[in-house]
Amino acid sequence: MTEVRKYIIESQDAGLRLDRVLAQKCSDLSRTRIKNLIEQHKILVEGKMCLPSSKVKENDEIIITIEPLVEALPKPQSIPLDVIYEDQDIIVINKPAGMVVHPAPGNYDQTLVNALLAHCEGSLSGISGVKRPGIVHRLDKGTSGLLVAAKHDKAHQGLVSQFANRDLKRQYFAIVWGRINPLEGLIEGNIGRSPRNRQKMALLREGGKEARTFYNTIEIFGRFASLVECQLETGRTHQIRVHLASEGHGIIGDPLYGRSPKGYAGIVQKMKELTEQNTRPLLHAYCLTFIHPMTQQEMQLKCELPADFKEAMTFLKQNVEF
């Protein structure tokens, strides 16, 4: 049902911005939600339309009309999820390789959003008035690992702010072709859409967005492959995949950037089988660190390597000459 709220401005709030006053009075609504309601003329001051920056006066009457949550366009689907952490505000999922995060042309269902809508049924209080999970960062279809989503506006805005300020830390494991030299370091370079292939991202001399990836070699499989840990300082599309490939060490199984070495036919073939015919890059988001948007407590969550990762490492150890 439609909810109507009424507030009378007190003397201590006179002269303040409307959105600031309402953010204090309506703890369950984010500033973004309040702004949207004002722009939709669902918030009136003395019966008149207003702006977020409008200054309020003592004894002003504010009426807020909050419509029922709009059902999200994607439909809930009962899909098993590996839930690493969940409370009334957020949920952290270990996404399997092969699952798309958001519905899109060619993948309208069986996505993580569809699964979350079903799993969180009854606990979503809405993101900007729509009953949906607030996903702050994404993982490519072929990438596995940790992803956090918010259940309501306040939590979503808190996570968005951390992502924008680069306070939300993500660490990945990747198995790459060859041995990186030096074994650890920082890869920098602006990333943007490739002018040669619009389906790919690329390092650009001009334009693009700043991108920084820290890497550290964890294990070496002869000259053939390496297990590398990566930490993102920025979050660009395909960032780790592009940066590692730019150093000549594409991720095994990456269909866009992971060029296989010549020779070693048996090993290359086995890697192809393990990565579903080079459609699953061996890239896994194993650690996520952030401040809980409501409790303000630091959280660090980790998940194990998936089975295909472990199998690839075992095979390389047993079949590569050191």
Image (cartoon, helix red, strand yellow):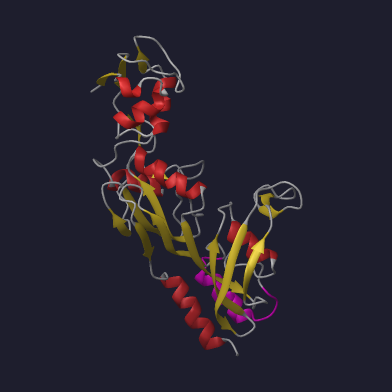
Residue at 34% over, 9% down: 47
Residue 271 lies in magenta, yes or no? yes
Q: Quadrant of residue 132?
A: top left
Q: Residue furthest top?
A: 47
Residue at 51% over, 88% down: 318
Residue 165 spot, x, y in % from top left = 51, 49
Q: Quadrant of the C terminus?
A: bottom right
Residue 125 lies in magenta, yes or no? no
Q: Number of labelled discs?
A: 0
Against 192, residue 269 (above or below) is below
Range covered by the magenta-colored residues: 261-277
Residue 256 spot, x, y in % from top left = 63, 59
Q: Is residue 215 left or right of residue 146?
A: right
Residue at 68% over, 53% down: 190
Front residue of this view, candidates 6 and 320: 6
Against 55, residue 272 (above or below) is below
Q: Is residue 307 left or right of residue 220?
A: left
Against 106, residue 261 (above or below) is below
Front residue of this view, candidates 274 and 14: 14
Residue 195 spot, x, y in % from top left = 74, 48
Residue 22 spot, x, y in % from top left = 34, 27
Residue at 31% over, 17% down: 62
